[in-house]
Image: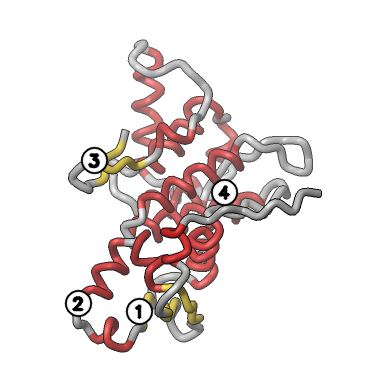
C-alpha cells in the first residue's frame, strides 16, 4: 500500500487556516456547523457577501439558515472539505428515492448559496446514481417527491429540471408516473414539459441520444462572473 503524501497547494492550505464561522441550520431543532471562513467564502458568494459587510451576522461571526435542513447542509460541508458528495444508498425503491430527494434538496441549497460548483457536483452525483445498479441488480430513477421538490423550488430554466425531463424522455416507463400514487401531485409543468418533449421527438425536433451526460446540465461561469446554463 502506497504511503506517498498528497500534495496540497498553498491556496488550499490558506482556505483551511484563519477564523472559524458558525452556521446555525434549522429552526427549533437546529445544528451548528463550524467552518473555516476562507473556505466557505471562497466557494459561496452568499456567505462572502454576508461576511463582507458590517451586518449583525458578520460581527457575531454567525450565519443563520433557519429554513434549511441540517442533514442537507451537512452534505455541503462534506463537499467543501473533501470535494466529493457521498452517494451511499444502493437499496432499491424507497431508500434510493429518498437519496434522490436529498440530492435535489442539496441542489436547491446550492442555488440559495449561489454556489454553482456545488450544484454541478450534485448533478454529477444524481447522474452517477442513475447509472449505477442497486443491490437488486436494477437501475432506479427518481419518482414522486424528488421531482415535486425540484419543480417547487427551482425556476423554469433550472438545469435540474432538464435533467429530470431527459431521464423520463430517454429512459422512462409509464409505470414511473403511476408510482406517484396520487397523479394529482405530479407537477403540471413537469407533465407539460414531458408532453412537449415527446411531441418534439415524434416530429424529429428532439435529440435522439439516450445517454445522460452530466456536464450537459452544469452551470458555467462567464467571464463577467454570471452563471449561464448550456
- Looking at marks 2 and 3 on the same chain, the residue that comes earlier in the sequence is marked by 2
Q: Is residue 41 left or right of residue 54?
A: right
Q: Kindly indicate whether the residue at mark 4 contacts the one at mark 1 (C-beta within 8 angstroms).
A: no
Instruction: Give the position of the C terminus as an image quadrant.
Output: top left
- According to the picture, the residue beneath numbered tag 2 turns out to be 53
- Looking at marks 4 and 2 on the same chain, the residue that comes earlier in the sequence is marked by 2
- Looking at marks 3 and 4 on the same chain, the residue that comes earlier in the sequence is marked by 4
The circle on residue 63 is 1
Q: Nearer the viewer, mark 4 or mark 2?
A: 2
Distance from the alpha carbon under mark 3 to that under mark 1: 29 Å
Q: Nearer the viewer, residue 225 or 98?
A: 225
Q: Nearer the viewer, residue 225 or 157?
A: 225
- Looking at marks 2 and 1 on the same chain, the residue that comes earlier in the sequence is marked by 2
- Looking at marks 1 and 4 on the same chain, the residue that comes earlier in the sequence is marked by 1
Distance from the alpha carbon under mark 1 to that under mark 4: 39 Å
Distance from the alpha carbon under mark 4 to that under mark 2: 48 Å
Label 3 packing within 10 angstroms: few (<14), some (14-19), many (20+): few
Distance from the alpha carbon under mark 2 to that under mark 3: 26 Å
- Dot 4: what SS? loop
Q: Nearer the viewer, mark 2 or mark 1?
A: 2
Q: Nearer the viewer, residue 229 or 208?
A: 229
- According to the picture, the residue beneath numbered tag 3 turns out to be 222
Q: Residue at x 76, y 49 (%)?
A: 2
Q: Nearer the viewer, residue 162 or 183?
A: 162
- According to the picture, the residue beneath numbered tag 4 turns out to be 181
**Which corner quadrant of the image does residue 139 belong to?**
top right
Q: Residue at x 33, y 51 (%)?
A: 154
Distance from the alpha carbon under mark 3 to that under mark 4: 42 Å
Residue 89 in view here: yes
- Dot 2: what SS? loop
Label 4 packing within 10 angstroms: few (<14), some (14-19), many (20+): few
Amino acid at each position: 500500500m502506497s504511503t506517498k503524501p498528497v500534495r496540497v497547494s498553498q491556496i488550499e492550505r490558506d482556505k483551511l487556516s484563519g477564523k472559524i464561522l458558525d452556521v446555525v441550520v434549522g429552526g427549533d431543532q437546529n445544528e451548528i456547523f463550524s467552518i473555516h471562513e476562507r473556505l466557505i467564502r471562497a466557494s459561496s458568494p452568499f456567505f462572502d457577501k454576508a461576511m463582507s459587510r458590517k451586518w449583525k451576522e458578520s460581527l457575531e461571526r454567525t450565519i443563520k439558515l433557519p429554513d434549511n435542513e441540517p442533514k442537507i447542509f451537512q452534505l455541503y460541508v462534506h463537499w467543501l472539505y473533501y470535494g466529493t458528495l457521498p452517494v451511499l444508498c444502493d437499496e432499491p425503491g424507497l431508500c434510493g428515492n429518498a437519496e434522490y430527494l436529498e440530492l435535489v434538496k442539496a441542489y436547491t441549497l446550492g442555488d440559495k448559496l449561489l454556489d454553482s460548483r456545488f450544484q454541478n457536483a450534485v448533478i454529477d452525483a444524481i447522474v452517477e446514481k442513475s447509472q449505477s445498479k442497486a443491490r437488486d441488480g436494477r437501475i432506479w430513477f427518481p419518482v414522486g417527491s424528488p421531482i415535486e421538490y425540484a419543480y417547487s423550488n427551482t425556476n423554469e430554466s433550472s438545469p435540474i429540471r432538464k435533467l429530470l425531463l431527459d431521464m423520463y424522455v430517454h429512459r422512462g416507463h409509464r409505470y414511473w408516473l403511476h408510482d406517484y400514487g396520487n397523479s394529482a401531485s405530479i407537477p403540471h409543468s413537469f407533465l407539460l414539459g414531458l408532453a412537449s418533449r415527446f411531441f418534439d421527438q415524434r416530429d424529429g425536433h428532439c435529440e435522439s441520444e439516450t445517454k445522460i451526460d452530466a456536464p450537459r446540465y452544469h452551470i458555467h461561469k462567464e467571464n463577467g462572473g454570471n452563471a449561464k446554463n448550456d
